[in-house]
Amino acid sequence: MTAGQALADGALALQAAHKESPFLDAGLLLAAAMGYSRDKLLASRSEQLPDYSLKTLRGYIDRRLSGEPVAYILGYKDFRHLRFFVDRRVLVPRPETEHLVELVLEMLPARDVLAGGAPIRHHDAFAGCGCVGLSIAHERPDVKVSLSDASGDALDVLSENAKLLDTARPGGAVQWSLGSVLSAAAAPLDGISANPPYVSSSFVDEMDTQGNKEPRMALDGGSDGLDLYPLIAAQALPLLKHGGFLALEIGDEQGDAVSRILAAAGFSGIRVIQDLAAQDRVVCGVKP
């Protein structure tokens, strides 16, 4: 069997199971089974597939059909300019979350506007694999970034990614700790970001019946998906410097509700940022 035939068979199997992006998924899994880059695979579709590669691919396709994300099968997920190690202990980074990173990078102060050279400090909560906080640290090495998560398993994954990305410098700019909501954050902060669980419990139940393999605690935001936002807003305000900001990822219909929560907590300058599909994705507010 040629690589092209194996790719077509894998894509058809995934399509029949109503998996999203079946051709892309099959291509990524086949490339991994052959030890090729995806570009090299596309240029090698007429090659005969070795038996061990075909067996590996079929195992990968079976795992995908069971509901396992491609990122867990491959062991990584690309996010912005970096590659993050992921497994079942953490949520798979979504492309939409890059909007949260972009907003933080836009809002963090520049070094030259700080009197006396005071360090710029940012905290990322619900950090998971570290894709948000470590991306910020990578792109703004002058910022002292701290990260936290309520899951010790997630922090183990985050630690591996910090080492892989060379941001785990002793006494350096990146630190992480166990903490619920913002309990591990220390004032004064220039910015806080968070990608909390914001999926409704009923929808997570539905996902579970369909074979969801991602950790429920990283998804379930209560009956309406909004359970954690009032806690985050209330805890964030005293941690921030005056003029500091809170940036939150949200579900695509939660912009108005989360805006009201931030306003009630005392934030001003509240705005909603939409993703490329014109869906609500990030809400931010500033401490007056």
Image (cartoon, grey):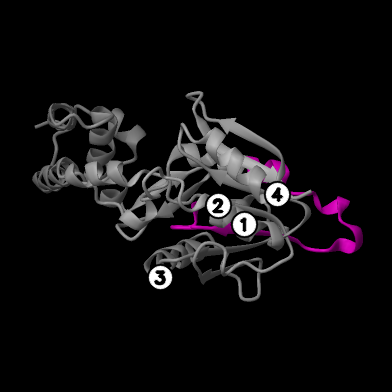
- Dot 4 surroundings within 10 Å: few (below 14), some, or many (20 or more)? some
| Residue under label 1 | 234
Q: Quadrant of residue 142?
A: bottom right
Which dot, 3 or 4, sits closer to the camera? Answer: 4
Which numbered marker is on residue 230? 2
Q: Which labelled disc corresponds to residue 266?
A: 4
Q: Residue furthest top?
A: 278
Amino acid beneath label 1: Ala
The tag on residue 75 is: none
Query: In terms of image quadrants, where is residue 3?
Result: top left
Whichever of labels 2 and 4 marks the residue nearer the N terminus, that label is 2
Q: Residues within 10 Å of mark 1 (few under 14, many from 20)?
A: some
Q: Which residues are magenta?
A: 103-131
Crowdedness near tag 2: few (<14), some (14–19) or many (≥20) residues, C-alpha within 10 Å? some
Residue 33: % across, % down: 21, 45
* Secondary structure of the residue carrying numbered label 1: helix
User: Which residue is depicted at the point 91% across and 63% down?
Assistant: 116
* Contact? badges 2 and 1 (CB < 8 Å): yes
Measure how far apart labels 2 and 3 are at the Cα level. Answer: 24 Å
In the image, farthest residue toward the right: 116
Tell me which residue sits at (49%, 66%) in the image: 180
